[in-house]
Amino acid sequence: MFGTEATYPPFEYRDDAGQLVGVDVDIAHAICEELQRPCIIIEHPFDSLLDELEGGDLDAVIAALDISSHYDNDIRFSDPYYRNAAVYVTLKSSTDRVAHSGYIGVQNGSSHQQYLIDQRQWQLTSYDELNGALNELRQGRISAIFVDSAVANAWLSDPNNSDLRLMGSPVRDLRYFGRGMGIALAKGRSQDALLESINKALEGLRQRNQLDHILAHYLKVH
């Protein structure tokens, strides 16, 4: 049973028909097919996913999680399935100086939030859903959004977001980003076999280029 949070396109979201889709959803289904197991995906708020995992209510979490050392020691990750970075998104009408001087929007419970907290140089506003951050950016309540590069690319490829731009250089601090995204599991001997099976499934998908096919379907750059 996988846990996810479905408001983070292109990784997990609901399409116009209300179906749960995205990079992580397709990868979860592909892993289940590889392992010949039924695929159940449960939605939870992002900042409670790892609590549900540690509590034993989920087998794994696939939700665009960065393989990061800041997570609880009781969490471990699969091999990476996507290499990533973090970027700042702001309005085209805003200068870099103005954008850096205001509040930065970030998803609550994310490695992006932890990075900015640890930097101690930003004023933060945290959101359960990043659509709320986009709305408040346009209303002038925040000055920029700190987000995964793939999410930013998805936003910028949408004609409705022609007022947005990237700001500065991508952030690849390996303590938080750059090691890639992985599937989270709880530590414990009972999970050893599942972790090994997931890693073997990912390697099989990689060797057959199925992983690249899923990424290319949703991401402009991967």
Image (cartoon, grey):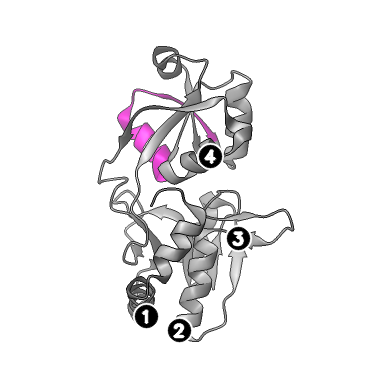
Q: Earlier in the sequence, mark 3 or mark 1?
A: 3
Is residue 3 something that shows in the picture?
A: yes
Q: Which residues are magenta?
A: 109-126
Separation (CA) of disc 2 from disc 1: 7 Å
Separation (CA) of disc 2 from disc 3: 20 Å
Give yes or no for residue 59 being in the magenta stretch: no
Q: Quick check: marks 2 and 3 in contact, CB under 8 Å?
A: no
Identify the disc placed on residue 197: 1
Q: Earlier in the sequence, mark 2 or mark 1?
A: 2
Q: Which residue position is annotated with label 2?
A: 35
- Hey, which residue is sitting farthest right in the picture? 17
Q: Quick check: marks 2 and 4 in contact, CB under 8 Å?
A: no
Mark 2, Cα crowd under 10 Å, few <14 / some 14-19 / many 20+, is: some
- Hey, which residue is sitting farthest bottom in the picture? 36
Looking at the image, which residue is at 74% across and 58% down?
17
Q: Earlier in the sequence, mark 3 or mark 4?
A: 3
Q: Front-most of 159 and 32?
A: 159
Q: Of circles 3 and 4, which is in front?
A: 4
Looking at the image, which residue is at 52% across and 15% down?
93
Asked if 178 appears above or below 147 in the picture, the reply is below
Separation (CA) of disc 1 from disc 4: 35 Å
Which amino acid type is marked by label 2? Leu
Q: Of circles 3 and 1, which is in front?
A: 3
Q: Front-most of 86 and 125?
A: 86
Separation (CA) of disc 3 from disc 4: 18 Å
Helix, strand or loop at disc 3? strand
Which amino acid type is marked by label 3? Val
Q: Earlier in the sequence, mark 1 or mark 4?
A: 4
Q: Quadrant of residue 40?
A: bottom right
Mark 1, Cα crowd under 10 Å, few <14 / some 14-19 / many 20+, is: some
Q: Quick check: marks 3 and 1 in contact, CB under 8 Å?
A: no
